């Protein structure tokens, strides 16, 4: 029977297997060798993203698995069991995909991953299909039982490996909302999938500015992804779009500055390269001798162009626009409400004969002017204020700058987190200028130690300039003029504090928190549309028999939240809004003349009335642990609410490091 089995005619080849065996073998050898060379080369280039520790283990695994797969398929094809060959193909594909996701950190790593995929395909096809299925070396006909046992064995081995990796090393998560846009694209169906490194936080703590995955404190079965901002023991204040910090060592107040890696990622695009007349007219207010031709702004003597255009002869202001690519459920009315003075202009400038070009960033009462002129030591950086005070900045650094007339210069001028940066050709400088609010906070702190969560700090941080807030970029020229090409204009994240959403427009109030020994403060990059540590509210439902349960107040699946949101009379606040006011705002800030106890009583009464109207006698209440209990509405005595503006250390899962299955392509998360 064995001889008859071996003499059976082979099935006709299909697809790739139509190629002659020597050709398939040669292709497999070439692809495996190319993948090995690219992997070795990928070890040496410095990564563009800091902290990509997984790059080296992944490349090492790619090299080893590729070499073992080549040896098995090209030297032991007839002896190696089919289980081993199948496992090697799956392993090679897996580490190749992981390397592909690292092309932002190293182009050679991405190339090695692509060649690894080709190597897996060609090696698998380098032997006959019958051999790959394990039929050639089988001495007797396989029974259904033996075939089933073989498949179960393979599946069990793969499952054990997957569970070990999933529990201790890597896990994939889907981003369901737009809270981290534009860093991560969120959608209930098409949201980014991310790989999470669950290994790193076993050996170190979360670091400031890095994205983190954690269990939601008020429903610990749900994973959240945000950016880590505040560390244990620190005081954090969000005011006027910026974040102020007092470290846990008791030092003075500082304006939190983004890390270099986070700084570049968190610029949000306002304007892409201006190439058309339509974009020029729609975005810039023109004055004096200024024209637009072939994608270039021609500035003559006294000519100026101001972004944004505004209305009539009045320039507009940069605001916190929707930078989420549209894939967020955040209402559009929540964007564009706050003036954002942290901006960046990227230009290409050519000075005319005896020409002088000026780029000016206007933030509130401050003007920062970068003047460029041909010659040596004639460029200046000046800080002007509305009261006429002028101060020259970085004079010693700019003394050696030399520019030539007619030379095309790449110019980058930005103000963010109280730091002024200018890059002109090969010259660069950085100057810390702070903000008026930082000066106010430091001055008061010297007189009396400020508590960031106090009413006093909130009042100080709510003060705005007499003329209102301003934010714009002005381009102008003198003398022989200049030619300017706009390569892009971006804004920084405007971090929102507390708002009363039922008011239109919703006034913003500062947000302050004092973190304890194991607490971290996290925020989403899409600040108006992020349910983050600013908005987490614990609801403690106390029943008449003395028992109590606690969970999230406004989770999307919380049935109690649905009843609370609907319990409202016309032109009155809902029960949910009343409880939110109690949790987030002090009585003096609400201006409604009611105490916390009054609002809570009104909210519970409205809840009962609405439940009777809807015929709802009980609701499923999801608890902090992730389970749920059945709560009778009539048994609810009161609802206590409190803010939970932190994540405890033991809730952190890991750090997301790579995006896959994304419509915008794979990438590493910086």
Image (cartoon, helix red, strand yellow):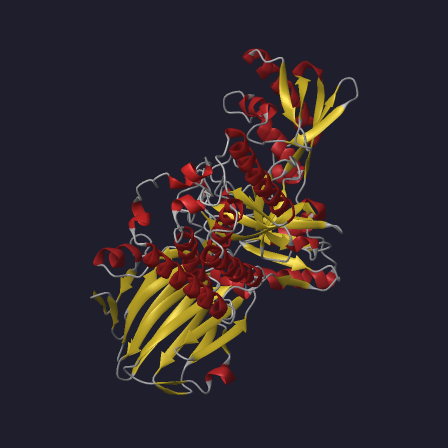
Q: Is residue 594 visible?
A: no
Residue 233: quarter of image? bottom right
What residue do we see at 52% from left, 50% from top?
Answer: 80
Compared with 491, 427 (above or below) is below
Which one is nearer the viewer's eye here, 605 or 658? 658
Say left or right for 237 vs 127: right
Q: Is residue 269 visible?
A: yes
Which image quadrant: the N terminus?
Answer: top left
Which one is nearer the viewer's eye here, 96 or 90? 90
Compared with 176, 378 (above or below) is below
Where is residue 423 shown, x and y percent of the image? 43, 74
Where is residue 206 shown, x and y percent of the image? 65, 55
Where is residue 24 shown, x and y percent of the image? 35, 56
What residue do we see at 68% from left, 14% from top?
Answer: 634
Say left or right for 605 vs 570: right
What residue do we see at 75% from left, 61% from top?
Answer: 250
Which one is nearer the viewer's eye here, 484 or 169? 169
Residue 490: quarter of image? bottom left
Say left or right for 33 vs 637: left
What residue do we see at 69% from left, 33% from top?
Answer: 625
Residue 351: quarter of image? bottom left
């Amino acid at each position: 029977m064995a001889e008859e089995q071996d003499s059976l005619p082979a099935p006709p080849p299909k697809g790739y297997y139509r190629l002659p065996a020597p050709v398939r073998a040669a292709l497999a050898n070439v692809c495996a060798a190319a993948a090995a060379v690219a992997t070795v080369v990928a070890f040496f280039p410095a990564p563009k993203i800091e902290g990509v520790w997984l790059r080296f283990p992944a490349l090492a695994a790619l090299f080893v698995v590729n070499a073992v797969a080549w040896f098995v398929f090209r030297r032991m094809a007839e002896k190696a069991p089919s289980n081993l060959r199948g496992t090697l193909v799956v392993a090679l594909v897996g580490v190749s995909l992981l390397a592909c996701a690292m092309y932002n950190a190293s182009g050679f790593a991405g190339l090695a991953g692509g060649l690894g995929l080709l190597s897996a395909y060609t090696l698998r096809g380098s032997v006959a299909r019958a051999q790959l299925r394990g039929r050639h070396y089988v001495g007797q006909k396989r029974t259904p039982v033996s075939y089933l046992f073989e498949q179960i064995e393979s599946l069990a081995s793969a499952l054990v490996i997957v569970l070990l990796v999933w529990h201790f090393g890597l896990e994939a998560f889907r981003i369901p909302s737009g809270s981290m846009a534009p860093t991560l694209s969120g959608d209930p169906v098409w949201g980014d999938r991310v790989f999470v490194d669950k290994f790193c936080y076993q050996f170190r703590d979360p670091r400031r500015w890095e994205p983190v995955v954690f269990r939601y404190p008020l429903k610990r079965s749900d994973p959240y992804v945000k950016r880590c901002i505040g560390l244990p023991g620190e005081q954090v204040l969000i005011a006027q779009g910026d974040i102020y910090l007092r470290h846990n060592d008791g030092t003075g107040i500082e304006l939190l500055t983004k890390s270099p890696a986070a700084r570049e990622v968190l610029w949000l695009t306002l304007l892409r390269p201006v190439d058309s007349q339509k974009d020029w007219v729609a975005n810039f207010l023109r004055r004096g001798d200024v024209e637009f031709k072939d994608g270039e702004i021609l500035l003559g003597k006294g000519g100026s162009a101001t972004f944004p255009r505004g209305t009539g002869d009045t320039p507009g202001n940069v605001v916190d626009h929707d930078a989420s690519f549209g894939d967020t459920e955040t209402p559009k009315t929540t964007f564009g409400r706050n003036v954002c003075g942290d901006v960046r202009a990227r230009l290409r400038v050519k000075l005319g004969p005896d020409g002088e070009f000026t780029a000016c960033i206007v933030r509130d009462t401050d003007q920062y002017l970068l003047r460029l002129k041909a010659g040596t030591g004639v460029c200046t950086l000046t800080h002007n204020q509305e009261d006429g005070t002028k101060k020259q900045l970085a004079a010693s650094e700019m003394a050696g700058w030399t520019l030539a007339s007619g030379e095309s210069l790449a110019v980058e001028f930005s103000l963010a987190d109280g730091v002024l940066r200018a890059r002109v050709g090969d010259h660069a400088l950085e100057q810390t200028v702070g903000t008026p609010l930082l000066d106010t906070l430091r001055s008061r702190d010297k007189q009396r130690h400020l508590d960031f969560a106090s009413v006093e700090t909130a009042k100080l941080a709510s003060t705005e300039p007499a003329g209102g807030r301003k934010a714009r970029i002005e381009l102008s020229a003198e003398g022989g003029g200049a030619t300017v090409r706009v390569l892009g204009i971006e804004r920084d994240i405007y971090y929102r504090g507390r708002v009363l959403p039922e008011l239109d427009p919703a006034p913003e109030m500062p947000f302050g928190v004092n973190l304890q020994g194991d607490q971290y403060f996290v925020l989403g990059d899409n600040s108006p549309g992020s349910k983050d540590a600013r908005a987490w509210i614990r609801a403690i439902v106390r029943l008449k028999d003395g028992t109590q349960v606690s969970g999230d107040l406004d989770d999307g699946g919380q049935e109690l939240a649905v009843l609370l949101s609907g319990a409202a009379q016309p032109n009155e606040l809902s029960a949910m809004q009343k409880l939110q006011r109690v949790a987030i705002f002090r009585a003096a800030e609400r201006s409604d003349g009611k105490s916390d106890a009054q609002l809570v009583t009104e909210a519970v009464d409205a809840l009962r009335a609405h439940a009777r109207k809807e015929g709802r006698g009980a609701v499923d209440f999801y608890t902090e642990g992730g389970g749920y209990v059945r709560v009778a509405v009539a048994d609810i005595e009161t609802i206590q609410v409190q803010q939970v503006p932190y994540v405890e250390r033991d809730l952190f899962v890991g750090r997301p490091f790579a995006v896959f299955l994304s419509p915008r392509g794979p990438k590493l998360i910086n």
